[in-house]
Image: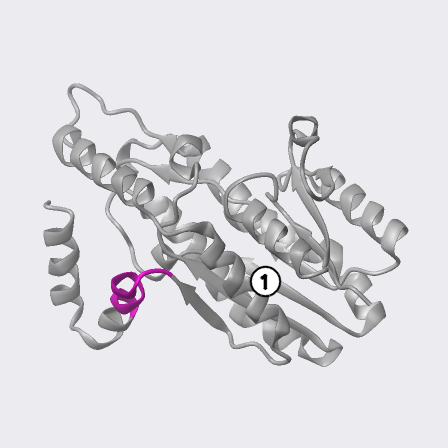
C-alpha cells in the first residue's frame, strides 16, 4: 500500500521538490498552500492550509483521512524567513514568524496525532534549519524559531514513543529556492546604527541562497528518512562546511566560535 504523505508548504521550493520526488517513488502526496488555486498544474493535490489557522489545518487533515482512510507521514515544511537587527524588528513580525515556524507546526502535529494513534503508526518530519543550531547575526529570530522546533521535537519524540509514532528533524542548509523573496526583511533605516553591517550581511545571506544546493538533495534525504524504521533525532542536509559548523560549535569555546561567525559575516 502506498504511504499517504502530507507536506505543508508543498507548492514551491523544498516542499515541492520533496513532493515531486515522492510521487516518483509511488507515494500518495498531498501538499498545502494558503492559496492553492495558484497551483492547479501541480503533480499532486494542493489543499488550502494556513499553519496559523487551526480550522484550515483540521479541514485539510480531515480531507486526506476521508479520502485515503489513513495518514502515514507528515512533513512539517511550511516556514518563513525573517531578517533584521533584533532591536529594530517590530514585535508583531517576531510573533508572526514564531506563529509560522513554531506554533504552526505544533498545530499541524496536534491535528494528525489522533489518526496516527488510531493506526498505531506514523512518521512526523519537522523541517528545521542548520541556522537553528546557532544564533546568527541579523537572523536571530529565525534561528530562535527553528531552534525551538528542534528542541520541541526532542521532547515530543519521548511523549509519543508509546504510540509507535516516530518524529525527527531534518535541518537544511542553504538551498536554491525562493525563500529570500518570501522573507520579512526589516528595512535598512538611513539613520540606523546597524545600517552598514545589516546591509552587508543581507547581501551575503541572499548570495548564499542564490548559490545554494539543489533542493532535490533535500528531497532525497527526506525519502531516505521515511524508509528508516527508527529514525534518528536529528538529520542535517547541506554542504560540508554548513554541517561542520554544528560540530565546531560543540567542540570550540563559545567566544572562539563567536569570533568565527563575526569574521565570516565581516562584522
The residue at the point 76 percent across, 73 percent down is 121
Horizontal and vertical percent for residue 13? 50, 42
Picture quarter with the N terminus:
bottom right
Q: Quadrant of residue 178?
A: top left
Horizontal and vertical percent for residue 168? 55, 68
Q: Quadrant of residue 23?
A: bottom right
Please state which of residues 19 and 193 is positioned toward the viewer in this rendering: 19
Please state which of residues 128 and 39 is positioned toward the viewer in this rendering: 39
* Residue 244 lies in the magenta-colored region: yes
Q: What's the magenta region?
A: 238-246
The answer to whether residue 228 is above or below residue 98 is: below
The residue at which mark 1 appears reads as: 125
In this image, 176 relative to 87: left or right? right
The answer to whether residue 199 is above or below residue 266 is: above
The residue at the point 50 percent across, 36 percent down is 96
Picture quarter with the C terminus:
top left
In this image, 143 relative to 166: left or right? left
The residue at the point 50 percent across, 65 percent down is 221
Q: Is residue 170 visible?
A: yes
Task: Label the magenta part by its dominant secondary structure.
Answer: helix
In this image, 213 relative to 165: left or right? left
The residue at the point 13 percent across, 65 percent down is 255
Horizontal and vertical percent for residue 155? 55, 71
The answer to whether residue 120 is above or below residue 153 is: below
Horizontal and vertical percent for residue 51? 63, 42
Instruction: Name the element at disc 1.
Output: strand
The answer to whether residue 13 is above or below residue 240 is: above
Q: Dot 1, how many residues are within 10 Å of its Cα: few (below 14), some (14-19), or many (20+)?
A: many
* Residue 245 lies in the magenta-colored region: yes
Residue reaching furthest to the front: 24
What's the colour scheme?
Answer: one colour
Q: Is residue 156 visible?
A: no
Amino acid at each position: 500500500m502506498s504511504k499517504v504523505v502530507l507536506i505543508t508548504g508543498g507548492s514551491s521550493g523544498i516542499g515541492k521538490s520533496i513532493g515531486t520526488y515522492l510521487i516518483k517513488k509511488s507515494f500518495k502526496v498531498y501538499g498545502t498552500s494558503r492559496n492553492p488555486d495558484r497551483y492547479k498544474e501541480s503533480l499532486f493535490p494542493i489543499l488550502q492550509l494556513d499553519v496559523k489557522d487551526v480550522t484550515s489545518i483540521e479541514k485539510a487533515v480531515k480531507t486526506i483521512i476521508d479520502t485515503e482512510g489513513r495518514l502515514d507521514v507528515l512533513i512539517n515544511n511550511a516556514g518563513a524567513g525573517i531578517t533584521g537587527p533584533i532591536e529594530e524588528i517590530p514585535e508583531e513580525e517576531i510573533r508572526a514568524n514564531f506563529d509560522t515556524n513554531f506554533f504552526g507546526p505544533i498545530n499541524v502535529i496536534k491535528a494528525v496525532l489522533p489518526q496516527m494513534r488510531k493506526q498505531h503508526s506514523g512518521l512526523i518530519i519537522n523541517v528545521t534549519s542548520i541556522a537553528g543550531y546557532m544564533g546568527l547575526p541579523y537572523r536571530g529570530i529565525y534561528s530562535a524559531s527553528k531552534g525551538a522546533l528542534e528542541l520541541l521535537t526532542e521532547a515530543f519524540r519521548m511523549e509519543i514513543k508509546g504510540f509507535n509514532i516516530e518524529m525527527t528533524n531534518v535541518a537544511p542548509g542553504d538551498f536554491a529556492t525562493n525563500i529570500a523573496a518570501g522573507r520579512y526583511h526589516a528595512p535598512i533605516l538611513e539613520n540606523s546604527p546597524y545600517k552598514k553591517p545589516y546591509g552587508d550581511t543581507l547581501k551575503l545571506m541572499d548570495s548564499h541562497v542564490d548559490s545554494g544546493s539543489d533542493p532535490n538533495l533535500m528531497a532525497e534525504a527526506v525519502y531516505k528518512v521515511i524508509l528508516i524504521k527508527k529514525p534518528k533525532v536529528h538529520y542535517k542536509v547541506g554542504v560540508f562546511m554548513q554541517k561542520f559548523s554544528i560540530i565546531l560549535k560543540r567542540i570550540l569555546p563559545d567566544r572562539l566560535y563567536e569570533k568565527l561567525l563575526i569574521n565570516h559575516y565581516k562584522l
